[in-house]
């Protein structure tokens, strides 16, 4: 686990090594560029958000990913591995909703749409954002790779 503030401040890529749910190797680089709370007032056609409560504490994490596998892979393979962990070691998966993360104008302006249901080509950087639902009142957050390793390059 690596502190989110440290990741953002460093501006550096970190190595991500894991296996997907089919035990296939998963290798990538990740750079965390920003983390900020969602303002629900920014969502157009909010009634179209179906998978997430409209008052949920959603945080947007801007990232850049580089696929280091020999072939293209689904972004979902990497997104399934990402966890945010608070200071008490509670883990939080990312959340997705078609409208919030893909079809809304907000999805486009916030970069959520750039990492929704795409394939990552080998060695080509792709920037975008992912969303997490977090509890109120956390003090620190860490990035963790489920069943894998996140390390400095």
Image (cartoon, rainbow, N blue to C red):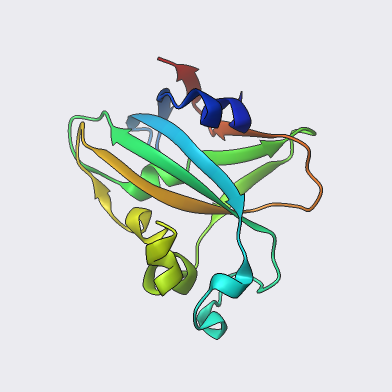
Residue 33 seen by the camera: yes
Q: Is residue 11 above or below residue 136?
A: above
Question: Which quadrant of the view contains residue 65?
Answer: top left
Q: Position of residue 38 (x, y in %)?
A: 60, 60
Q: Position of residue 59 (x, y in %)?
A: 61, 53
Q: In this view, does 17 lie above or below 21?
A: above
Q: In this view, does 82 lie above or below 43?
A: above
Between 141 and 28, the residue placed more toward the observer is 141
Between 66 and 74, the residue placed more toward the observer is 66
In-image side of 44 versus 20 (left or right): right
Q: Which residue is drawn at 20% across and 34% down?
A: 122
Q: Where is residue 95 in the image (x, y as percent from the top left)?
A: 55, 58
Residue 98 seen by the camera: no
What number of labels is visible?
A: 0
Q: Residue at x 37, y 65 (%)?
A: 108
Q: Which residue is drawn at 36% across and 53% down?
A: 115
């Amino acid at each position: 686990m690596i502190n989110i503030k440290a990741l953002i401040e460093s501006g550096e890529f970190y190595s991500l090594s894991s296996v997907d749910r089919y035990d296939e190797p998963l290798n990538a680089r990740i750079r965390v560029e920003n983390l900020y709370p969602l303002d629900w007032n920014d969502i157009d056609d909010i009634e179209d958000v179906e998978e997430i409560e409209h008052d949920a504490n959603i945080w947007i994490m801007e990232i850049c990913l580089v696929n280091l596998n020999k072939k293209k892979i689904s972004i979902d393979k990497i997104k399934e591995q990402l966890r945010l962990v608070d200071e008490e070691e509670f883990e939080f998966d990312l959340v997705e909703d078609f409208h919030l993360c893909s079809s809304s104008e907000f999805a486009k302006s916030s970069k959520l749409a750039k990492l929704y249901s795409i394939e990552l080509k080998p060695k080509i950087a792709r920037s975008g954002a992912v969303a997490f639902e977090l509890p109120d009142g956390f003090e620190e957050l860490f990035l963790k790779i489920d069943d894998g390793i996140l390390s400095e390059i």
